[in-house]
Amino acid sequence: MLLSAMLGGGDVVVTGGNTPRSAYEELAQAVRAVGHDLRDTTVWFSDERCVAPDDELSNYRLVKQSLLDPLADFPRPAVRRMRGELGPSEAAEAYARELDEAGEPEFSLVLLGLGPDAHLASLCPDQASLSERSRLVVGVEESGLEPFVPRVSLTLPALANAEQVVFLVTGEDKAGAVAAAFGADAQPDPHIPASMLVPLARELTVLLDPAAAGRL
């Protein structure tokens, strides 16, 4: 799914986290095996911590190490990173300008993880950012999850502007969040951020390992 989206060109949104890291490593191996370049693909980010791009907390650093660096000898995708080092407000404004300059692209794929509290990107439970409908990017001054650093995040309308949204979720500690956000009785609830994307997305897929699916 990720491989076909990347090879197909267009605009792809990536995210941070240990589960996506494994997917990026596998994707890099697959791209090398296929021998296909990614010059027609543009990589965007769902969110970022307000740290330098080489900081160990940086989502860009994770993607660079697991996906971009292993393809250093290939024609690589264009990368539109969030400049978290500018601070939440300025970084959000800068990224909104980049999206605007690109014509507010419809993403071919938005790849997301899920937190144990059901957060997605850097949209955390019960925060005002979940109600944002006019802006595509917001600064998050106070993070609702560790590490407690300010962040910048795409909003729900931006994440929903995609041909396909895919959640990658692993681990027993995510089982409750999976059931609350995507279970048969789930309803949009600001206490369960991922549930609020479900009715907005045109096509949404949740890929789970057995542990994460244990409470469905």
Image: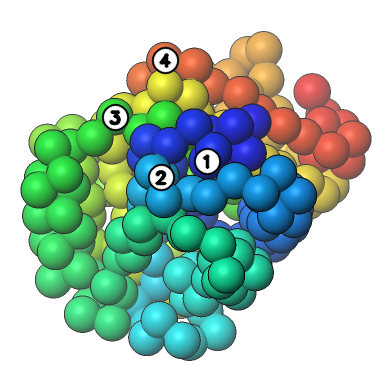
Q: Residue at x 41, y 50 (%)?
A: 39
Q: Please tell me whether mark 2 sits on a helix, a strand or a loop.
A: strand
Q: Position of residue 128 (x, y in %)?
A: 25, 48
Q: Position of residue 9 (x, y in %)?
A: 43, 37
Q: Which residue is mark 4?
A: 202
Distance between the alpha carbons at the discs numbered 4 and 2: 21 Å
Q: Which mark is first along the chain, 1 or 2?
A: 1
Distance between the alpha carbons at the discs numbered 3 and 2: 13 Å
Assess whether mark 2 and mark 4 are in contact (beta carbons under 8 angstroms): no
Amino acid, disc 3: Glu
Residue 87 location, quadrant: bottom left
Q: Residue at x 53, y 50 (%)?
A: 37
Asked if one can make out residue 41 in the rendered structure from this viewpoint, the answer is yes
Q: Residues within 10 Å of mark 1 (few under 14, many from 20)?
A: many
Q: Which residue is mark 3?
A: 106
Q: Residues within 10 Å of mark 4 (few under 14, many from 20)?
A: few
Residue 25 location, quadrant: bottom right
Residue 41's mark?
2
Of labels 1 and 3, the one closer to you: 1
Q: Position of residue 113 (x, y in %)?
A: 59, 47
Residue 6's mark?
1
Of residue 148 and residue 78, the one placed in the foreground of this image is 78
